[in-house]
Every structure is written in C-alpha cells, then in structure tokens.
Amino acid sequence: MSDLPILDRPGTTGNSLAHLPTAGPSAQRTVLPMTAEEMRQRGWDGVDVVFVTGDAYVDHPSFAMAILGRILEAAGFRVGIVSQPDWRSADAWKRFGKPRLFYAISAGNMDSMINHYTANRKVRNDDAYSPGGRIGMRPDRATLAYCQRAREAYKDVPVIAGAVEASLRRLAHYDYWSDKVRRSILLDCKADMLVFGMGEEGIVEIARRLEAGESVRDLRDMRGVAFALGASEPDPDDALALPSFEQVRDDKLAFAEATKIIHNETNPYNARRLMQKHDRRTIVCNRPALPISQASMDRIYGLPYTRLPHPTYTEPIPAFEMIKESITIMRGCFGGCTFCSITTHQGRIIQSRSEKSILGEIREMGNDPQFKGTISDIGGPTANMYQMKCTKPEVEAVCRRQSCVHPKICKLLGTDHDPLIEVMEKARKTPGIKKVLVASGIRMDLARRSPRYMRDLSRHHVGGHLKVAPEHTDAGVLSRMRKPSGDDFEKFADAFNHESNKAGKKQYLIPYFISSHPGSDLHAMIDLAVYLKRSGYRPDQVQDFIPAPFDVATAMYHTGIDPFSKKPVYIAKHLRDRKLQRALMQFFKPENYVEVRQALLKAGRGDLIGSGCDALIPARPPREAILKRREKAGEQFAGQYVHTVPNPEKKKRTKKESRHSEGAGYRPKRKSR
C-alpha cells in the first residue's frame, strides 16, 4: 500500500488524496469485479471492502461507486462491487465471501424515494440509473434494506452507510412520502457509522484505520461522520444540542429551529459538532469534512476509469448515456438555493480541477475512435463557478452566510471568469474536439459580470438551445428560493440574444420554472403563466417541487414557517392545489383547460379567460379538453375497486401466506407482513 496521510492538520484544505497514483495514458483499465469469478481472475482470494449500490455499475467519475471504488483501489485495497442486488436475500452480500474490512452501503446517486416517486407520489415510469431504464431494481429506502442485509450476511463486519440518501437523513428529518418526521436513518438502518458529504477522503481513512487494527468506535473523531451513541454512553461535552427528535416531531417551530441550527453549521471552517437526542439514544454529527485540494481533485479524476458501464450490461443505462461525453471541472455550489441539496451534500466551497487535468481528460476523449467530437457538457453542479472563492480567507473562516450570492453577491466573492474562459477556449481547440457545449446550470447573475464569458458562451458553446433556471417570476417566491430577482433572467436573456445576433446565430433560451414551491400560491403562478405567454415560452416539462430531506424549503413545506425569519409561508400542500399550479405552467395545452379555468376562477382572475391579449385560455373549451375530461371520468370508475366481480379461479391466500410470491418486502422470512 502507498503511504497516504490519514488526517489533515485542523483548518487546512483536505489533501490526503494528493499522492494517489494517476492512471497515465498506458494504464490498464479494467472494471472492478462484480462477481466472484471476476475477483478470482484478478488473483484475489477475497476483498477488503464490498461496495453495495442501488445504481448500475458504471465505471465513470460521475458515478459514486466508480470514484470511491477507484480511490480505494489506488490506495491499495481490494474492492468488490455489488450493484442493484436482490434485497430479498443476503446471498448477493456473500458473493465475495466475508469482506476483510467493511461494507460500504449506498442507495445510489439519488435518494431512492425521489428516484421512485414523482411529486404526486406516483411511481415513476423509469429509473435512469438502471439498465434499460427499468424500475424496481432497488427497494424503497434502499439504505435500510442494504444495511440490514449486510448485517445478516456477516454480523461482525462493520457497516458504513453513505451517499445522498444517508447523508441527507442523518438527523431527524421530514419525509414527504410518509408525511411525517422520521428519526435519524442511523437508528433504522443500524449502520455502525454514516459518512456524509462526498466521502472520498473519509472512505480511505476508514479503510486505513480499520486495517491498522482500530475499531469503528475509534473512528468517531473523524470529520464528516455521524454515529449513534449507546443508551448508556454519555453525551459529548463539545457538541451543540439540537431540539430532540420528539420535539421536532411534535412541534413545527422546534423543527424550524433545528433546521436553522443545522444549516448554520455547514461551513467546515467554523462548524460545530451537533447532537440530537432520540429517546434514550443520541445521534452525534461531527464537523463536515474539509474541502479537498486541487491536487486531490486531479488525482480523483485521473484514476483509470474505463468510462463505460460494466461489460455484462446489454441494455443502455440512461444516466450514463446522458453524461458519458461530459467533463466535470469542479464541485460544490455557494448558491445555497433552499430547494437544492447540492450545497448541503457537496459543500459551499468550490473545489476545482487544474487546467492540466481537465485538458488531459479532453485529449484522451479526443483520441477515442468511438468519440464523435462533441463534449456534451463542461461544468459541474453549476457551469460558471470554476475556481471562484472568497477573497478573504480570514473572513471565510468565520462566515455563516447561507449563500454567497443572495440577497446580493458578496463583495468578497471572487467572480473572475477568466480561468474558466481559458479552459473552455483551450478545450474547443484540442485535436479531435469539434464542439464543447455548456449544459450545466448557468448562474446568470455571475455570468452577466463577464461580457467576455457571455460572448464566448454565445458564440462557441451553445448548440442552438441553452437551458437556464430562473425558477419563478414572483419576488416573494424567489426570495424563499434564494434566487435573484426576476429581471435577472431578462437582463441575461438580452445579453445572450445580443451576443448571438452579433455572431449571426439563431439561438434560444429554455427557461426552467418550479411550481408549488413554498410561498407560491395561485396568484404567483398566474403571474408566471401570463409572463410565459407574453414572452412566448412554452415549457415542455414542469418541475414540480419535491420536498427532499434536509432542504430548507422542505422545512418550510412541513412547518409553514421560514426557519430563519420564523415568518409564515404559504404552502400548496394538497395534491389538488399542486395540480392546478402545474396546469397553469402549461396553460397552452388543451388537456389542461379544465384545471387552468378552475385555477383562474378560484383566484378571481376570470379576466384571463376569453380572447384578450393576456387571456390564457379561450372562453369555450377546445375539443381536446372535452375528450380528456371524458377519458378521466372513465378512469375514475374503471378498475377493480368499483363493482368488481370476484374471480373464482384466483387463489385465496391463507393467513400465513404473504401477498408477495417472493416474500414480503426485503424481509421475506418474517411470519407476518
């Protein structure tokens, strides 16, 4: 094994991955083993770490299992991948034999509940992270099932949970799908420890310290981890106490206060340790991990990824098809949007790759005979925060702002676009590269500060359409989102159109808006619909707000209170209200006529029905609306719930039989459901 530093000095940027070996142009690129046979082909008789994931195994740095598996491999550990296992049995957890160090559990790149269900709580039609987009390849709340199966497979092997699902549920949280406050996921999944955040340095440190003979309990001094104390263990003296689980469950004001405290303790340079009582047990959440250095970022993205799905897959994996020709140049986001989990998971501090690392990956893509010459996206969580940071480190070390750009751009924030402009220019001039597109979300208020960036973006990096996210037009809603004012989009659109016209190009903006966000009522959505009509925008898709665990907007949704001001916030909580808001955003669709008319009449805006210049719908319903209404009326009385005739051939279950032929849920040996 290589000699890697285990811990960084307090207060310094994380750099413990900086000495990992890089791939090099001639490095052998072989996927990590997914079967015992593949393990034996490598000459191994066992593995150190079994990485269990709810996603298909794609050996590309946009997938968590690839990054973490490759980092462990580079540090000298043997890793086996268990991808989308059958959770009804522990057999898949035993395929490599007993792991020497630990199980690493991940629900996947997304929270499994968001992956499974729409904002209407309906089952999604596809899963972008599964072969062929098939659904049903992972259970609901996958972290719970996977941890329990790991414990069943080998009781004495440590179980470490991580990824987005576990990270955002590490403390008491509101769960939209059950409409209740749930306790920390640690108490339900019974993992020994939870790693929150991106986890690259954490997983290497865990492996090295366990190998050195330390126990999981010895790892409680690590940054970026959470754990549950035993009922008889004393609470730590250095932790900031949150309102207990029982308090936040029963009192919405206490839930709002807990949310405020948690989000005030996210700056790794000044965050305090947190603890939260759950009956007789205490969840302890250590300080966040330090941001990793540019050298570490370069090592991570320079590891020998094949950049392909595991060869056993015969069907395309939609998420891979979307990102396979993209380039990640940075991570993190200082926007702090209340409805977004990126800042919470990746951190507010921007961590960027070097120009050399980025261009090296681009040259490698250009040399691939299968590559068509177009980079589909160059960016990260946002397109234009590359190498941006606070110009006063001593201020950053004590800052507790939730956003560096809201309510206005901080005067200490470095917003220079020149490093990004130079990378983009060199990227498009690399041999084998025909086009470098920008598809990540552009922070429009930052982009307008650089005329040169706007010029290069419009002339060289847009493929006819550019997606942007103004999110709303109502000032109150935008404030709840921590987004710029509505005229920010207008000013960006004017600058973009001006530069496109100068370049002789006909290019369009595709704006994205959110319906049913906290603070958004029918009047706000009607104003947005009128704006869309006046501007000529017709959204193909509607983003309906989904309350994800841990987000500030989710706390607003659950409590009806702004956690920071404690002022009341309007919430469109009933599915009927949400349906009306969605329909207003697509008022131009005939099938939405009835809902749009109901919304307008309910809001007292009958003036928008008819033939006026701002009218959203005509006075008489179009034929498509009538047919759609008849179809829905038929659906209402269709199915087995109305006048169902019993089927005599259908087998009647005994009391001991499960309703599932394969067993009930992911615990098939239980006697009852």
Image (tube, rainbow, N blue to C red):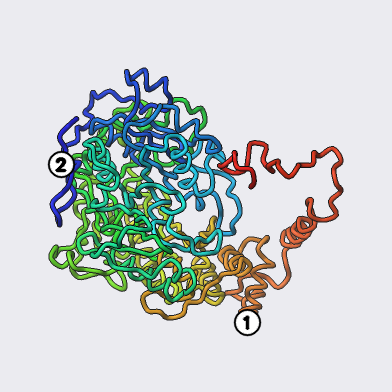
What is the number of the mark on residue 604? 1
Nearest the viewer among 202 and 394 is 202
Residue 411 position (above or below residue 607):
above
Q: Nearer the viewer, mark 2 or mark 1?
A: 2
Residue holding disc 2 = 5
The image's mark for residue 137 is: none
Q: In this view, does 525 lie to the left or right of 551?
A: right
What residue lies at 32% left-to-right and 27% top-to-bottom?
A: 368
Q: Pinpoint residue 158: horizontal percent, then vertical percent.
A: 35, 40
Image spot of residue 275 (x, y percent): 33, 63
Closest to the observer, 93 or 365? 93
Q: In this view, does 383 lie above or below 247?
A: above
Q: Is mark 2 on a helix, strand or loop?
A: loop
In this rendering, position of residue 83 left or right of residue 119: left
Tell me which amino acid carries mark 1. Gly
Neighbor class of circle 2 (other Cα within 10 Å; few <14, some 14-19, many 20+) is: some
Does residue 386 appear in this view? Answer: no
**Three-letter code for the amino acid on which mark 2 is drawn:** Pro
Q: Which residue is drawn at 28% across and 35% down?
A: 72
Can you tell which quarter of the image residue 521 is in? bottom right
Residue that protrudes farthest toward the front in the picture = 232
Q: Is residue 556 visible?
A: yes
Q: Position of residue 236 (x, y in %)?
A: 27, 62
Q: What element carries label 1?
A: loop
Mark 1, Cα crowd under 10 Å, few <14 / some 14-19 / many 20+, is few
Residue nearer the viewer, 401 or 649: 649
Residue 340 vs 146, above or below: the answer is: below
Determine the image quadrant of residue 203: top left
Q: Where is residue 55 in the image (x, y as percent from the top left)?
A: 45, 39
Of the numbered discs 2 and 1, the one sitting upstream in the chain is: 2
Residue 525 falls left or right of residue 166: right
